Amino acid sequence: MSYSRFPQTLPAPCFINSGTLINKDDMRRVLSDIVRVRYLHILDNRILSEGEGWLLEVFSDPHQGTIVANGSLYLNVQSFDYLRLQVVSPQETHLDLIQDNRQLRLIPLTNTEQDVEGTPRCDDSTIDWMISQALSARWDVQFDDESLSDSVSEE
């Protein structure tokens, strides 16, 4: 019998607040819970542009581009080779999306655990109540429409 000293498969990587992610699904997962960011577009270690914006979409598609315009960010993880995570201070984390000599640095301003200014937070019971009210209103409209068409057909 021969026994190998090493396991046949390596465990999946584990990142705790820092590291370099090359797997596109991991990149998408890290970015998907970010709401608002400060961003820096860096080329050859020079800042070309910077601003703040809402992260509206994170996706993986080799046929679409990453777009940063009008205070909105649409990030395609396929546009980048890797994502570097680093904690700069207890209040600030940098997420650097790297592709050759181009870097898009994202500095989260809020995340899903924090309230976004002007956006009301709802708990599950509030959402359930809102859905039941919307469905009830839809049934009322359908009932009213049926009553109206019955009364028109009688004339």
Image (cartoon, rainbow, N blue to C red):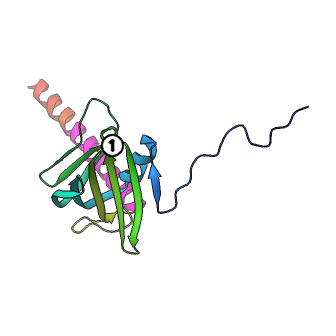
Give whichever of 131, 32 is nearer the camera. Answer: 32
Q: Position of residue 79 (x, y in %)?
A: 30, 40
Q: Residues within 10 Å of mark 1 (few under 14, many from 20)?
A: many
80, 31: nearer the viewer: 80
* Depth order, front residue of 24/34: 24
Residue placed at 26% from the left, 53% from the top? 55
Which quadrant of the rendered structure holds the C terminus? Answer: top left
Give whichever of 154, 103 is nearer the camera.
103
Residue in the image at 47% along x and 63% along y: 17
* Element type at mark 1: loop
Image coordinates of residue 49 in percent, x first then y, are 15, 57
Quarter holding the N terminus is: top right
Instruction: Write the start and end of the magenta stretch as one range.
Output: 123-144
Residue at image position (22%, 50%) is 73
Give the residue type at disc 1: Phe
Residue 154 to residue 51: above or below: above
Residue holding disc 1? 80
